Image (cartoon, coloured by chain):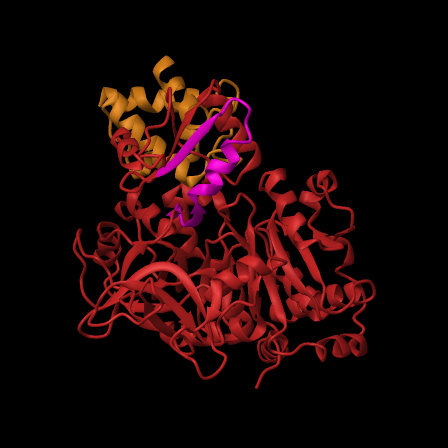
Amino acid sequence: MEELMEILEELRPDVDFENETALITDGILDSFDIVALVGELNDAFDIEIKPNNLVPDNFNSAKAMLELIEELQDE
Amino acid sequence: METSVLCRLNRTARTYADKVMFKDNDRALTFAEFDAYTRSIGTYLSGKVPAGSPVIVMSGRHTLTPACFLGVVRAGCFYAPMDGDMPVTRLNQIIGVIKSQFMLVDRAHLATAETLDFDGEIIVMEDILDTPADEKLLSARESTLVCTSPLYVIFTSGSTGVPKGVITSHQSLMCYIDSVCKVLDINDTDIMGNQSPLDYIAAVRDIYFPISRGASTFIIPKNEFAVPAMLFDTLNREKITALCWSVAGVELPAKLGAFDMSKPEYLKKLCFSGSVMPCKYLKIWQENLPDVLYVNQYGPTEATASCTYYVVNEKVDDDTVLPIGKPYDNYRILLLNEDNTATENGAVGEICVSGPVLALGYYGNKEVTEKSFIQNPLNPNYRELIYKTGDLGSFNADGILEFHGRKDRQIKHLGHRIELGEIEETAKKLSGVTDCCSLYNKPKEQLYLFYTGDATSKEIVLYFRQNMPAFMVPRKLINLEQLPTLPNGKTDMQTLKTYFK
C-alpha cells in the first residue's frame, strides 16, 4: 500500500487518496492521469493492466487499485 | 454572401426542425428547440447589452452551452467562452482581459461565478430560457452584424503569463467550416462525437457542423475518456460517424487498448489536429478501421484553427512522419526566412498564413497583435496581412508541406498549446521559487520544472493545481542548487535535458 500511495501522491499531490472513493466517477482523475498511472503501476508492480481492468470500480479508490494490483500479481 | 452564422442557423433550424442537433447524457435538443433557446437568450440579452459587446459564457459540457453562444450572437454580440471547471485564478485572468459587463453562467457554476473578480451582471442561463422571443428586436440586432464582426474570443497560453484572447470573425469561421466540410464531406447524415472542451478552438467543428450542414453532435462526458470500453460503447450507442479530435484524444483509446474489446462500428471520418501524430497509434486505428477517412490537420487558433490538411491514404508504420499537406480553400501559405524573404528549393522557413481566415487580432492587445499579424513582406503593392505562426515548415518535391517544429518555446502537450514561459512566470509567483526553467520531455509527454529555492515539489504542484488548467501542471519537479548556465549567462537547457528519464 505504501508504494502505491507514493506513486499516487507524486501523480496528484492535491488529491486525498486516503479517503476518496469516487476518483473516476467524480472525474477527479482524468484520462491523462489514468494513462500515466497505468504505466507507473505496470512498471512498479511488474503487472500488466489490461483494457478490461480499466473500469471505474477498479480505480475509484486507492483500496480498489491495491486489490486490482494483488489480483494481477497472483495471475 | 452570408453576413453572419445566423444566416446558417436560420436555414438549418427550418430545414431540420425536428431532428436532434445537440445531445448529451441528460438531454437532446432538436434544431427547433435549440433555435428557440437562442432566440430567448438573444431577446433577453438585447434588452440589456448594447450590440457589439463581449459576453462571457461560463459553463460546462452540455447542450445549453452552444445555445448560449448562439444566443449571444442573436443579440448582435460576441461570446468569450470559459470552462467553469478551470481554476479561479485562470478565470480571473480571462475576465481581466475581456472586461465584459455581462456573464451567462449555468446553475452548476453559479457559486464559482460569484467568487470571481467580476463586477458586471451574472445571468443564470437556465432562468432565461423561456423569455418570449421578440422577433422585431432580434431581426434589428441581426442586421447590425457584418461578416467581419467578431464571433468569439478564445483564450490561449501567453508567454508573459497572461492568456491571449484570439478574436475570430463570422467570415473566418464560415470560411474554415466550409473548407473542412468539403475535405471531410460532412453532411446531414453525420453524427459528431465531441471530445474538445467547448471553450476550446477545436470544438468549433462540433458546434458549427450542425449549424452549417444539419449534422448532429453528441457531447461525450469527460470521464468516459478514462474508461476506454465505455468510450467505444458510447460511440456505438450514439452511432457516431465523424470525430474531430485532438491527437491526444485519438491516442488515448489506442494507448489504453480499447480496440482489444470493441471498435467504433459506425465511424467513417476521423480528423485529428493539435500536435504531431505518433503513427504507432494511428496504425492501430488504421488496422482496426481500414475504411475510415483519416485527415491530419495543422494550424493555429489565429488562423481559425487551421491552415493545411493531409488525407492519409497510405498505411502508416510506427515511424511514419505525416506531412501537414496542402492549404484548405481560402488559405494561402508562404514560407519566410528570418530576413523576411521567401524560402527557395524546399528550404525550411517560418510558416505564414494569409486569407480571410486570419483572426482580428488579440483582444485589447494592440502591441502583440501588430507583432504577430504583419504586412506580407513579399507584397509592396497593397495591404495584405499575414500571420506568422512561429512554426517551421518546408515544401517537398510534390509541393506538400512538411512540419519541422517550433522556432520558439511553445509546445503542444495533451492537445493543448502551452508557452513554457508561462509555466515559469507562474512558478516564480511562489515565494519559495527563486529561479526556474520549464522544459518538455516530448517522448514521455512530461512537463518538467527545474527550480531553485526552498519550496517543496508538493507546494509547487498544489499551487499550479489551484491556479492553472490541469494540462499546465508540471509532472516532474527537480530542485537544484542553481540552474546551469551558458557562457552568455542564459540557462543551459541542453544540460537540464540530461535529467529526462
Q: Note whether A66 is above or below B439 in the view shown.
A: above
Q: Which chain is red?
A: B
Residue, x 46% and y 21% (percent of image)?
B453
Taking depth in this image into account, of B234 and B58 the one nearest to the observer is B58
Taking depth in this image into account, of B153 and B344 the one nearest to the observer is B344
Image quarter of the N terminus of chain B: bottom right
**Residue reaching furthest top?**
A2
Taking depth in this image into account, of B289 and B317 the one nearest to the observer is B317
Residue B186 found in image quarter: bottom left
Could you tell me residue B179's position as x and y percent?
Answer: 42, 75
Could you tell me residue B33's position as x and y percent?
Answer: 66, 67
Q: Which residues are magenta?
A: B410-439
Residue, x 40% and y 73% (percent of image)?
B377
Q: In the rendered picture of this protein, how many numbered marks are placed on residues?
A: 0
Residue B170 found in image quarter: bottom right
Q: Is residue B64 left or right of residue B498?
A: right
Q: Is residue B166 left or right of residue B476?
A: right
**Residue reaching furthest right?**
B47
Image quarter of the C terminus of chain B: top left
**Residue reaching furthest front?**
B488
Could you tell me residue B311's position as x and y percent?
Answer: 28, 69
Taking depth in this image into account, of A40 and A10 the one nearest to the observer is A10
Asked if residue B270 shows in the view, the reply is no
Q: Note whether B343 is above or below B111 in the view shown.
A: below
Could you tell me residue B386's position as x and y percent?
Answer: 45, 70
The answer to if B287 sits in the magenta stretch is: no
Residue, x 71% and y 68% (percent of image)?
B52
The answer to if B436 sits in the magenta stretch is: yes
Asked if residue B119 shows in the view, the reply is yes
Q: Is residue B246 left or right of residue B85?
A: left
The hue of chain A in the figure is orange
Q: Is residue B241 left or right of residue B315?
A: right
